[in-house]
Amino acid sequence: MSLYAIGDLHLHFQTELKTKVQLKGRGWRNHEKKFLKNCSRILTDEDTLVLVGDHSWGKNLEYCEQDLQFITELPGRKILTRGNHDMFWDVKKTARLNEMFAGKLEFLQNNYYTYQDCALVGTKGFTFEGPFYIDRRGYIAGWDEEAEAHAAKIVERERKRLRTSFEAAKADGYTRFIMFLHYPPTSVIEESSVFTEMAEEYGVEQVIYAHSHGEARFYDSIHGEKNGVLYRLVSGDFLKWMPVKLLD
Ligand SMILES: [Fe+2]
Ligand SMILES: [Fe+2]
């Protein structure tokens, strides 16, 4: 019995694919088949898999049916968090999704789940990704202030949602935490963020994140241990479509 994670499946069984990375990027050809093969090799019905956002390109639930069915049919228990491309998932309707997929999929948002004595908490997160203005020597000389102000609002909303998830688990007596974000915990220009601070505040053991896919983005944020917290990128292409084990 083990806990695994992976993110950014970007399934498109009912959607025409338009993104260059996925059409031409190394490692994306038949990626869902590679992923399925890996899952059937390592996962059993006793295991739990957390899927860390960007599940489907579908523009609404109707266009995600086959993608979510694909996830439903994977072995074991499946917990999903929201990614920026998950248009089918309105935060306010999370309870409705949990009702619709009861016994099949679990949707983590403003709630928490458990694995043994560990609370699994999380939210989409957010980082300011520019646009940055780069000078001739390649240094960042400034950035779009309007985009930065907009990002700050989303970060604040996500910070509150993450706190809600932590507090729900804490109120039920949990002291061990694994924290899931879709976005990296820090942007390319940050050393820390409200998300890393919250991870340290609650004594989180591992912070799991995705969103950074394509080789150029793999090292945008923290990898490995920092201030007692283990940070792990689990984007599917980074993991070559093999879910990573978080806990036995
Ligand atoms: Fe993605
Ligand atoms: Fe994403």
Image (tube, rainbow, N blue to C red):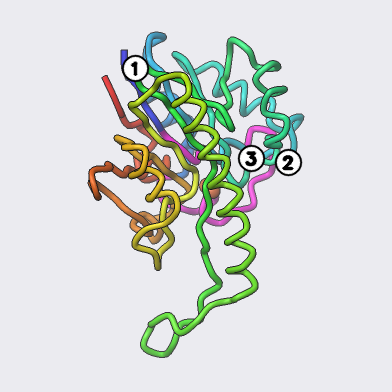
Q: Is residue 121 above or below residue 116?
A: below
Which dot, 2 or 1, sits closer to the camera?
1
Instruction: Say which of marks 3 and 2 sits in front.
Output: 3
Label 3 CB, ligand 2: below 8 Å?
A: no
Cα distance, mark 3 to mark 2?
8 Å
Q: Seen in the image, is 159 located left or right of residue 233?
A: right
Q: Is residue 82 left or right of residue 50?
A: right
Which residue lies at the image location 38% right of the left edge and 83% below the top edge? 138
Question: Hey, what amino acid is under mark 1?
Answer: Asp
Looking at the rendered image, the disc whose residue lies closer to the viewer, 1 or 3, is 1
Task: Compute the Cα span from label 2 to label 1.
Answer: 37 Å
Is residue 10 visible in the rendered image? The answer is no
Reading the image, the residue beneath label 2 is 59
Residue for point 64% across, 41% down: 57
Between disc 1 and disc 3, whose residue precedes? Answer: 3
Which residue corresponds to mark 1? Answer: 117
Determine whether label 1 and label 3 are within 8 Å by CB.
Answer: no
Residue type at mark 2 is: Lys
Residue at numbered disc 3:
86
